[in-house]
Image (cartoon, rainbow, N blue to C red):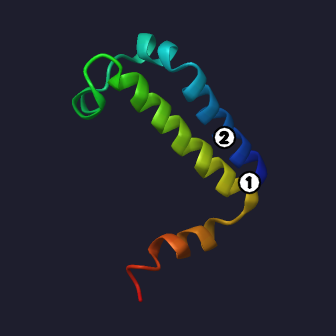
């Protein structure tokens, strides 16, 4: 079941990266992305970065390495 969910998340991320202009035209601009990433292409970059985050999360679901990844991520905070 994790593999199917991971593939769906991965495909959503790829769709966000490839079709970021379509998402911009249909869902509009993100104010925080325009503020932090630039005035003209900030929203496109925001959609692409969100897509890359989805791709990484999808790969983590597919491989089943969520516990070890979270352990690595939080390990500096809980010594």
Q: Residues within 10 Å of mark 1 (few under 14, many from 20)?
A: many
If the image is split into quadrants, where does the N terminus sit? bottom right
Q: Residues within 10 Å of mark 2 (few under 14, many from 20)?
A: many
Q: Is residue 49 left or right of residue 77?
A: right
Instruction: Answer above or below: position of 55 versus 74.
Output: above
Q: Are marks 2 and 1 in contact (CB under 8 Å)?
A: yes
Residue beneath the point at 25% across and 20% down: 39
Residue, far top = 25
The answer to which image quadrant residue 30 occupies is top left
If the image is split into quadrants, where does the C terminus sit? bottom left
Give residue 24's position: percent from left, percent from top: 42, 16
**Element at badge 2?**
helix
Q: Is residue 47 left or right of residue 65?
A: left
Give residue 5's position: percent from left, percent from top: 70, 47
Instruction: Answer above or below: position of 55 versus 11.
Output: below
Q: Which residue is mark 2?
A: 10
Residue beneath the point at 73% across and 42% down: 7
Q: Give the mark, 2 or 1, whose residue is nearer the N terminus.
A: 2
The answer to which image quadrant residue 25 occupies is top left
Disc on res. 25: none
Disc on res. 62: 1
The answer to which image quadrant residue 8 occupies is top right
Give residue 12's position: percent from left, percent from top: 62, 33
**Element at badge 1?**
helix
Residue, far left = 35
């Amino acid at each position: 079941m994790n593999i199917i969910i991971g593939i769906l998340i991965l495909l959503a991320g790829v769709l966000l990266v490839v079709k970021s202009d379509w998402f911009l035209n249909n869902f509009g601009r993100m104010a925080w992305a325009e503020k932090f990433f630039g005035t003209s292409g900030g929203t496109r970059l925001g959609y692409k970065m969100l897509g890359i985050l989805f791709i990484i999360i999808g790969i983590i679901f597919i491989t089943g390495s969520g516990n070890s990844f979270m352990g690595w991520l939080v390990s500096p905070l809980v010594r």
